[in-house]
Amino acid sequence: MYISIEHLPEGVLKRYHADLAPKGLAEEKFRREVAAYSWFAENDIAYVPKLISHDVEQLLMLVEHAGVPLNHWIADGNQHLWPDVIRQLSSIDQDLYRRRVNYLFSSPADVLVDEDGRVRIIDFEYTEAGCGYEHLLMTAMDNQRLFECDEVAAESFLILVRKAIPTSYRYWWRRLRYSVYGRMGLLREQLIRINE
């Protein structure tokens, strides 16, 4: 894989390894991610941690520390905070949709939860503002990465997530639109995969 992520005391370090990626792909993803962080900062989005620094030559960025990945967090217990974390995911999903931010290919590893149960999202290599949000954020939690740390806890958490998914903002309209656009091959995720 040509992307590495390290959770360090000073923040989350993400590096794109251009020598391991198809020509120009790492640079394009890096550019897109830096642009997304800038857009979130300009719009004062609280659920996205700040980009501390980035290096265009080395294709690396350091993002402020904002907790541990969701799959690790649920393995540590915290069951009393699970409903609130799910509520926050739903709120983030609604805000992304209303702001027309297309946040693609997210997973439980891209959701950070701090010691107080505050949720933030990272990993914006496929994110574009102004083109519509195609996914339901909570459906992205139904992902094999959720089970990497504690399968029993992951299954229990996922039961709550699946119950909450139909309460997502404009749920039925978004499912219908996603299905129709998918059949027509017009989803941005389809176009990106074709181009990459």
Image (cartoon, helix red, strand yellow):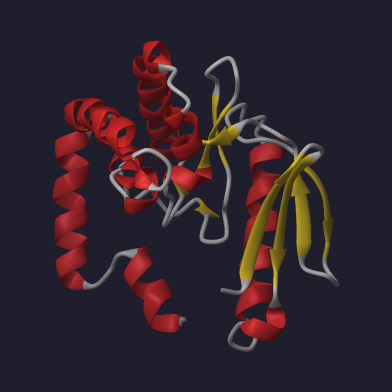
Q: Position of residue 31 (x, y in %)?
A: 69, 65
Taking the spot 39% from the left edge, 50% from the top edge, the residue there is 145
Q: Residue 49 in the image: x percent, y percent?
A: 67, 35
Residue 184, quarter of the rendered image: bottom left
Based on the displayed image, in which of its 4 quarters is residue 94 positioned? top left
Viewed as shown, does residue 129 lie left or right of 174?
Answer: right
Q: Position of residue 45 (x, y in %)?
A: 61, 31
Classify 71 as above or below 86.
below
Residue 89: percent from the left, percent from the top? 40, 29
**Residue 80 relative to residue 42: left or right:** left
The one of 15 and 89 positioned closer to us in this rendering: 15
Question: Which residue lies most toward the top here?
Answer: 80
Q: Which one is in front, 98 or 15?
A: 15
Q: Is residue 146 above or below residue 48?
A: below
User: Residue at (47%, 35%) from the top-left corner?
Assistant: 70
Q: How many numbered discs?
A: 0
Q: Residue at x 40, y 25 (%)?
A: 91
Q: Quadrant of the N terminus?
A: bottom right
Which residue does the image show at 43% across and 55% down from the upper left? 104
